[in-house]
Image (cartoon, helix red, strand yellow):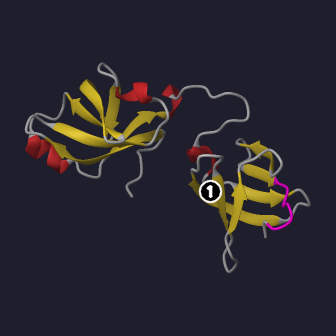
Amino acid sequence: MPEPPPDHVAVGQITSAWGIRGHVRVQPQTDFAERFDAGSTLYVDGVAAKVTAARPNKGGYVVLLDSVPDRNAAEALRGALLTVPEQELAELPKDTFYHFQLVEMDVYSDEDEYLGQVAEIIETPGNDVYIVRKPNERDLLLPAIRDVVLDVDTDSSRMTVHLMPGLR
């Protein structure tokens, strides 16, 4: 998976070309659909591109960017990330975090035992599940619920959790 440029956050990934006029199919990586509205600015490989048209399509979007003139140019972008600068992110409610803020965060138990780092986040209908990985140990699957996640400190990149019975 490609990485976004420094100080940028991925909001979607181009999965294929669509049609002959330069449209691309985009798999969103954001809960904010307005990122793909006509007139929005997205970045492809760090270069600004204006959304000139967009519409929902099969769980994603079909998007036309002003910098993509035809199907050949669209095909060349397959796999590219669409990003926005971090400072343009919407402010989230208290105790809500962007996934990029949590991935690679150190996780400790409420007894100060180092459990590993958040390696991945699985989205489920009920709640997210954090996969906590520590070398040479089995992954921990921690539900992102108040009874388990006690504190998240993005400044120090530290999460404190309570290991309920059965989580280990």
Q: Does residue 79 belong to the magenta stretch?
A: no
- The residue sitting at 67% across, 71% down in the picture is 139
- The residue sitting at 62% across, 56% down in the picture is 104
- Identify residue type, mark 1: Glu
The answer to which image quadrant residue 57 occupies is top left
Between 124 and 149, the one nearer to me in the picture: 124
Tell me: residue 87, above or below residue 136: above
Tell me: residue 163, above or below residue 71: below
Query: Does residue 85 appear to the left or right of 95 in the view shown?
Result: left
- The residue sitting at 80% across, 44% down in the picture is 146
Residue 45 is situated, as x and y percent measured from the top left of the image, at: 31, 43
Between 111 and 25, the one nearer to me in the picture: 25
Residue 107 is situated, as x and y percent measured from the top left of the image, at: 75, 58
Q: What stretch is highlighted in magenta?
A: 161-166
- The residue sitting at 15% across, 49% down in the picture is 75
What residue sits right under mark 1 in the picture?
104
Q: Does residue 163 belong to the magenta stretch?
A: yes
Q: Can residue 98 be seen in this view?
A: yes
Point out the image quarter for the N terminus: bottom left
Tell me: residue 166, above or below residue 107: below
* Magenta stretch prevailing secondary structure: loop
